[in-house]
Every structure is written in C-alpha cells, then in structure tokens.
Amino acid sequence: MENNFDTIVAIITPIAHGAVGIIRISGDKAYDIAQRIFSRPIKPKMINYGHIVSDNQKIDEVILLPFKSPHSYTGEDVIEIQCHGSYVILDEILNIIISKGARIAQKGEFTKRAFLNHRIDLSQAEAVLDIIESKSQKSAHNALNNLGGYLKQKINIIKSDITELYSKIIASVDFPEDVQEVDNETVVTICNDNISKIDDIINNSKSHDFIRDGISACLIGKPNVGKSSLFNALLNYNRAIVTDIAGTTRDTIKETLNIDGYLINFIDTAGIRNENISDKVEQIGIQNSISTIEDSDIVLFLFEKNLSEIDKNLLEKAKNKKIIFTKTKSDIYPYVSTDNDNITNIISVSSVTNGGINDLKCAILKIIKEFIPNDTNYTTNMRQISCLKAAKNYLQNVVEAVNLGDFCDLYSNDLKSAIMSLGEISGEVLTDTILDDIFSNFCIGK
Ligand SMILES: Nc1nc2c(ncn2[C@@H]2O[C@H](COP(=O)(O)OP(=O)(O)O)[C@@H](O)[C@H]2O)c(=O)[nH]1
Ligand SMILES: [Mg+2]
C-alpha cells in the first residue's frame, strides 16, 4: 500500500447484547496480532474457526475472517473476528488486541482509510454514511447506487469533458504552431452543455432531500374537525390526544411514516380559529400552525361538511402548496356537499371506521411522485451541491468572458477552477478540514 498507517481496531457491531459481535482490525500488523491471540494457524482466504486465547486462557469461541491487502474494506490487511455478542467479551478481546499493539479506531477511520487507499472516492465514502443513516428503502437504495459509483460517474463525465477542453486550450497557447486554437463557439457549447448537466443534478437535489429526509405533510383545519384523530389513524397508533374540547392540541406534533418506501413527516397542528382567543398558549399554537403550513410540502386541509369563511381565509396561506382536501367524519357526515366551490378531488375519511385512509395515502404518494421525478437513483448532499454550484459559476464566467471577446488565457483559469471544484466532490482535491468534517459524522467502527 502507498500509505503506511498504524494498525487500528474497533467493535463494528452495535454495543448491545446480540448473538454475534464483530471486531475489525486493519493495518500492517493485523495478521500478526490476530495470530498471537488465535488458537490455530490462520489460513488466508478461509473461514477460520478457533478460540481467542490470552495468558493460556480461552476468552471466546470465534470465527475469524482474514482479508489480504488490497482486497479488503480498507484496502489494508484486515482481520474480522466474529465473537459472541456479549459486550463484556467484546470489550475484553478489544483490550487484548490493543495490548498487542493496535490502536482504537476513530469515528469513520476504516472508511477514511478505504478512501485514502483509493478503494473508494469521497462520494462513495459519503454513501457509506448515507446507507447507515437511511430511514427508508428508497434512500438506502440510492445511497447504495452512490457507493457503486453512480454520482461519481456523473461527475466524471462532466469533469473529463471540461478537462479535455482545458487541455486543448492550454496546448494551443503553449504550442501555437502545432495545436489549433479552440474556436469560441466550441468553448461556449461545451460550457453550456456541462452547465445544464450540473443544473440537472442541482435541480434533482431537492428530490434527494425528499427521499433522504422525507416530505412534510401538515394537517390543518378548524378545532375539532378531526386532525389529531386522522393523524393517529394515519400512524395507526394513538400518538396525539383526542378530545371534543376545542384547543386540545396546542403544540405541533411530528411523526414519520414510511409509505411504499417513501418517508412522510406528518405534522398535527392546533386548530385555527379567528375569534379572540384568550388562552395565550393556544394563540402561540395557532401561530405555529400558520408557520407549519409555510414549512410543509403538502397540506391536508380538513373540513367536516363545507369550507367555512375562516377555512377559506386559511386556504390563502396554503395557496402555493400541494393541497389535499380531506372531508372528515365520513361515518357521520357521509355525503360530500356540492357547495365546496372550486374544490375538486375531495377525499372522504373516517378515523373511526378507517374508511378512506388508504385513498388518502395514495393521494399523498401521487404527489410525492410528482415531487420526485426523473433520475433520482442517486443522492447528493450539501457539500457536493456547493461544489457543483461553484463549478457552474466558473463555467458561467467562461461563457461570459468568451462573449465579451476575452482571450483564452484570461478565462482558462476559470476552467481550471471548475475542474478543481468538481474534483472536490470525488476528493481528488481536498483539505484536511474537509476530510475531518466528513468522517467525524461516522460512528466508531465504520
Ligand atoms: N364520528 C367521528 N368522530 C370523529 C372522527 N374524527 C374525530 N372525531 C371526533 O371529533 C372530536 C375532535 O377530534 P380531534 O381529532 O381531537 O380534532 P382536532 O381538534 O381537529 O384535532 C373528538 O371527539 C373525536 O372523537 C371521525 O372520523 N368520526
Ligand atoms: Mg387536535
């Protein structure tokens, strides 16, 4: 290996009682240390069965998996020991390994080494964290695609296009007799093409946020319309307090539901009334409801029979949102009235019989699919998006400079900066601070 690091060790399974717990050792001394504590000669590329032994005492019966550099998670020599999942045993074995010369791994250090040893690039390292943290199947699936290099390939296509342009321009400046100058039209076309590819990724990033963090859907409507009951029916358990006393829900309550692999953050709010409400806590709750509408992607607008004047005023506040009109208490008010002017697609629900709850979930899913269009088989994070925005800015500078008639030696630096910004995504160009920031978010053992 090109990098020469010390040997690190950590328990890589959660600290809890379970059938199996795994300890990973990585580094030059991994085999040597393992052999000194294992009861049998370690056979490479084999599943080894034996005991961990210290001072002639058996500590645990284990399975030991040896990986030879570079064919391991970190790219270094790696030993993984599957012990019984008792924290006492795991801790004892960990301490024995440390006493033989390994050091306890820092957060994310195994993945950091995989990156530093060129096993994966930075976008793939970030994907490892995304997989661990994913809260829905779709989110895990996208992160897995990134680990396989999905985002990396997209960025590489853009980067190699700009790099080729940059090289031709530099060559034509350095060797004017041998290399033909790149004409302005070609420069502008290549830059604009790549700006639009970058835009596609940036525009899709909102969808990636939706997939990773979920879409928020708030329940709005007058007191006693049945918001908390519907909230509970959607979640399928009694999360919010339900009474027939107006003003029962004073604070907003948030719970996440996974529907068909997508996360929806439902928010129950305090009912909104127009009268002079004397209770200060309830007043604050109502203010919170109004700002919840602003922060939500979808508004479930609840009414019992007809929309009142207050409801109509409130609708104003939600006019830029995706609204699902939800008629509540269909068990006692079964007919959809006709005087709900201009409102179509009303979904009738009952939190008592659960009638219509599935239709409501389907309507929410339909909107989610509008929010998450096109190519969303990968994910991006804020760091990657800010690198892409920087690259886009540099390319726009180039286009502007060409249109102003500047010479290529004036804009070639911007091209180079665009390449550098894209290089930051994969980690070719990076600082220790970026590295520390990324890997400090990992858990020990990853
Ligand atoms: N029959 C019937 N009663 C309901 C339904 N949903 C809510 N309620 C009743 O309406 C009252 C107010 O419900 P709640 O969910 O607290 O309304 P909120 O103030 O909008 O949160 C309670 O007495 C509920 O039992 C429903 O679908 N059918
Ligand atoms: Mg309520």
Image (cartoon, rainbow, N blue to C red):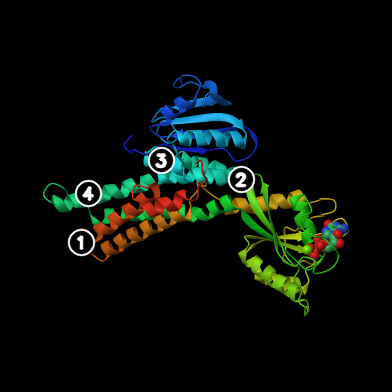
Between discs 2 and 1, the one toward the N terminus: 2
Q: Which mark is residue 407?
A: 1
Neighbourhood count class around disc 1 (C-alpha, 10 Å): few under 14, some 14–19, many 20 upward: few
Compute the Cα span from label 4 to label 1.
Answer: 14 Å
Frontmost residue, 128 versus 366: 128
Write down the quadrant of residue 68 in the picture. Answer: top left
Q: Earlier in the sequence, mark 1 or mark 3?
A: 3
Q: CA distance from mark 2 to mark 4?
A: 45 Å
User: Which comes sooner in the sequence, label 2 or label 3?
Assistant: 3
Residue that numbered label 4 is attached to: 168
Q: Is 153 placed left or right of 93 in the picture?
A: left
For mark 4, give the secondary structure.
Answer: helix
Give the number of the mark in front: 1 or 3: 3
The amino acid type, in three-letter code, at marker 2 is: Ser
Residue nearest the observer in this picture, 60 or 207: 60
**Distance from Cα at disc 4 to Cα at disc 3:** 35 Å
Name the N-terminal-most of marks 4 and 3: 3
Q: Quadrant of ligand 2?
A: bottom right
Say which residue label 3 marks.
Answer: 113
The CA distance from mark 2 to mark 1 is 51 Å
Q: Nearer the viewer, mark 4 or mark 3?
A: 3
Could you tell me if the residues under marks 2 and 4 are in contact, i.e. CB atoms within 8 Å? no
Q: Give the amino acid type for the residue marked by disc 4 in the picture.
A: Lys
Spot occupied by residue 25 in the image (x, y as percentages of width and height): 46, 34
Mark 2 / mark 4, whichever is N-terminal: 2
Instruction: Report crowding for label 4: few under 14, some 14 to 19, many 20 or more residues within 10 A (C-alpha).
Output: some
Q: Which mark is residue 136?
A: 2
Identify the residue at horizontal 25%, vertical 51% (top origin).
166
Dividing the picture into quadrants, the one containing residue 293 is bottom right
